[in-house]
Amino acid sequence: MNRKEECQIKTSILKVHLIFCNDDLNNLFRIFVASKQLNRLFQNMGNIFSDNQQIEVVSSFSELVNTSFQGMMNAICWHRNLVGNFKEIVSQLQLNEDVTVISAQDLLALQLSEEGDMARKMILNDLQLLNDFGASPVLNLLKCYERDEELGFISTDVYSYHVDRSPIGTDTFLCTYHGAASDIIPNDHVEQKILIPEIREQLKKLHDGPEEEFEDFLREYFFDLHYQPKPNAEPVNLGKGHLWRIAVDHPEQQALPCVHRAPVENDGEYRLLLIC
């Protein structure tokens, strides 16, 4: 091999090396860009509610209970990822009624795997946090709620979009650990059912009393708490594992009460729900 050929070979090797390096750099750049895009995607997934004006997303229990409702914002979400096997807990619990209250002692009596125990600790911690705050949390194992189908033209069960009402200042807390999760809906996406002419007319026939007592009748039987979605309304599913605080209709409330509903349960699947 002469000097010229040796130089040509070295030059070719150098070119191949440079091409390989350039490809590596290009690949690394593509990987970097993709990772940035994935990171943004995961961030958006982690804050799926952050662009919703109705919802304030927080990262701690302290923020959850100390953030004030204001304006259009009437739902606060402590956004969390479920850790542990909640299905294992549900499979070991005993359903005595369609809605069965589960105590901390019931949970502690379960023989669970490591992942099941992680799930149990999360639930027990939530119960403790809410109790320490002064709330009265209840953990329910749910097959279904009672349906209100008596009247036909209006229902007052929890599957209907509704608001909660209290004579004193309070909020509703809820978290779904297993099964279908509840929905909320913006207040401007719904219409109060008692204001829908055909429903109001039927309610007046049902009342069959003095006109001046009609509004009291609507409140007494909770008809005024229920809402119907408008066309193209966009409800928001609350998801699993997030602890929510939603606004209640009470005399001191500074925001509109949060309109929400219970979900239709999935076939053959119980819900595990914390609520107070």
Image (cartoon, helix red, strand yellow):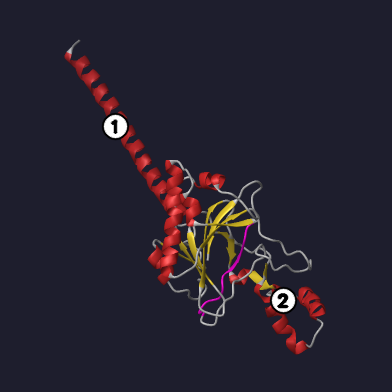
Residue shown at the point (42%, 52%) measured from the top left: 121
Pointer 1: what residue?
Answer: 21
Specify the farthest residue to the top: 1
Pointer 2: what residue?
Answer: 194
- Is residue 266 placed above or below 51 in the rendered structure? above
User: Sequence-wise, which precedes: disc 2 or disc 1?
Assistant: 1
Secondary structure under the numbered disc 1 in the rendered image: helix
Report the label total. 2
Please state the horizontal and vertical placement of residue 172, each as a whole percent of the image: 53, 68
Please state the horizontal and vertical placement of residue 195, each as a whole percent of the image: 72, 77
As shown in the figure, which amino acid type bears the numbered disc 2?
Answer: Ile
Q: Is the stretch drawn in magenta largely helix, strand or loop? A: loop
Residue 71 magenta: no
Q: Identify which residue, 8 or 72, lies in the foreground.
A: 72
Q: Which residues are magenta?
A: 253-263
- Is residue 106 placed above or below 200 in the rendered structure? above
Residue shown at the point (77%, 73%) measured from the top left: 199
Q: Is residue 208 left or right of residue 33?
A: right
Q: Is residue 224 left or right of residue 59?
A: right
Residue shown at the point (65%, 46%) measured from the top left: 268
Is residue 41 shown to the viewer in this render? Answer: no
Question: Label 2, label 1: how many angstroms apart (C-alpha)?
Answer: 71 Å
